[in-house]
Amino acid sequence: MTAKEQIIPKLPDEIRRLLEREDFTRLEEIRLRSQRQVTLYGAGEHKRLPHTATRSDIERTLQLVSGSSVYAYIDEIKNCFITLEGGHRVGLCGRAVLHGGGVANITHVSGVNFRVARQVPGAANAVMPFVVKDGEVANTLIISPPQCGKTTLLRDLARQIGGSRKVSVIDERGEIAASHNGVPQHDVGEMTDVLDLCPKAIGIPLMLRSMSPEVIVTDEIADCDVSAVGQALSCGVKIIATAHGDDFRQVLRRVRLDGVIDEFGCIITLSRRHGPGTVEKIN
Amino acid sequence: MLIKLIGGAVIILCAAKIGFDEAGKYGKRVRELRELQVALVALKGEISFCRTPLAEALTKTARRLKTPAGEVFLAAGGGLKDGAATVKEAWDGAISAARKNLSLNGDDLDILSAFGGLLGMSDAAGQLENIELTSAKLSAREAEAEREEQRFAKLYRSLGVIGGIFLAVLFL
């Protein structure tokens, strides 16, 4: 099924009819905002469709996207998204209902953003020789600001390394494999297991015990994950992770990696100087 | 005379059949109410432990049911899977489609319809409350249906046979 066939049935009839005529090959986002025109974004341009999204349009969209099963996707909704079949992500915006210091639900949804998923096979070709040296996987940290392609790179590393090694992906935010009802919607490798929506600090020890991985792939490590990463490294399991930041120093200031950083043999810094995924530096 | 006797026997059999069918409806209603409660327990498991999306949870539940009550779950699940309907639309559509095969009365169907109105659109705890509330209501209806079965089932059966005999005698 194409992205168009996967996304269009999730929209109300009128918007569906307008989108039937659109070309999805360069489309990145479809945005519905209450009382505003439906907008399409793609290749740096935006286009307004001749339809103003109503509250009921948005409610209908939510029902279609969640299969009328809020309880089944509540953990995703708390993080303001739902993943569709095909790995497309539907971002949600509305009123946050707080409970116990965290977000318990998003109600009165006023904005919905369909982000068309596109896997880029081969995105990691340039860095593969540095990540896998002499048949050995190096512990790798990918540093990049948002929107620079670090998840795309990480996904392709999982796919390529997972072709011949046991890889476990701990997909806390559901972005690497984009699982829909537990099934990865992106190709993350033949020998890759995915633990979906589980915090890394809990997921890494779980995978170590249950799936005996050779490589653990995970995204956006923070302070609270460092001890789990240390545990994996002490078991001889390789780690490939990402961290938000402009450069290595900035990441070190934010995340206390002191105890484990020496183990990382490959540190890749990304930017979007020549488009997303520009490799700035490999140490 | 032989023809008259055969005719009389036919009248008695027909009247008895009508009486037994009417009486059977009471038993069927009790069985359907019981099975709906079993269905709710199954649905509860799907929602609370597996977090199965509604379309699939309803279809899975339907597979465990034998009476026409299963048709409601199957049709509602199918309607949702197509993505064309909201839960309320799919559920009410399924109830009216299965209605002619069900022995449930109007009040029973109202309970079912109200259940569908809250289905899907809250977290698991909210869904479980809806299931438990509906289960309690169905259980009360089941007790009432059993009492009615005891009171009227025998009555309709006897009425059928006696009415048949009365008519036969009248014609003879």
Image (tube, coloured by chain):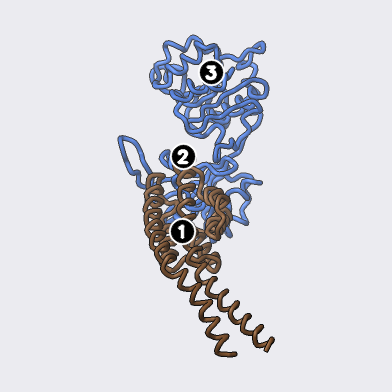
Q: Chain of mark 2?
A: B
Residue A222 or A214: which is nearer the viewer? A214
Vertical arrangement, residue A143 with respect to residue B138, above or below: above
Query: Which chain does the brown colour mark?
Result: B
Which is closer to the viewer, label 1 or label 3?
A: 1
Residue type beneath disc 1: Leu
- Cα distance between the residues tagged 1 and 2: 24 Å
Q: Residues within 10 Å of mark 2 (few under 14, many from 20)?
A: few
Q: Which mark is residue A278?
A: none
Q: Which residue is mark 1?
A: B33
**At numbered mark 3, what does the secondary structure look like: helix, strand or loop?**
strand
Could you tell me how far apart the alpha carbons at marks 2 and 3 are, in whole angstroms?
Answer: 32 Å
User: Label 3 belongs to which residue?
Assistant: A239
Horizontally, residue A140 falls left or right of residue A122, namely left
Give the quarter of the figure containing the C terminus of chain A. Answer: top right
Kindly indicate whether the residues beneath marks 1 and 2 are on one polypeptide chain: yes
Q: Label 1 vs label 3: CA separation?
A: 56 Å
Whether residue B84 is visible to the viewer of this picture, yes or no, is no
Q: Residue furthest top?
A: A262
Q: Which chain is blue?
A: A
Quarter of the image where one finds residue A215: top right
Place of residue A148 in the rendered image (x, y in percent of width and height, measured from the top left): 52, 30
Q: Are marks 1 and 3 on the same chain?
A: no
- The residue wearing badge 2 is B49
| Residue type of the residue flagged with mark 3 | Ile
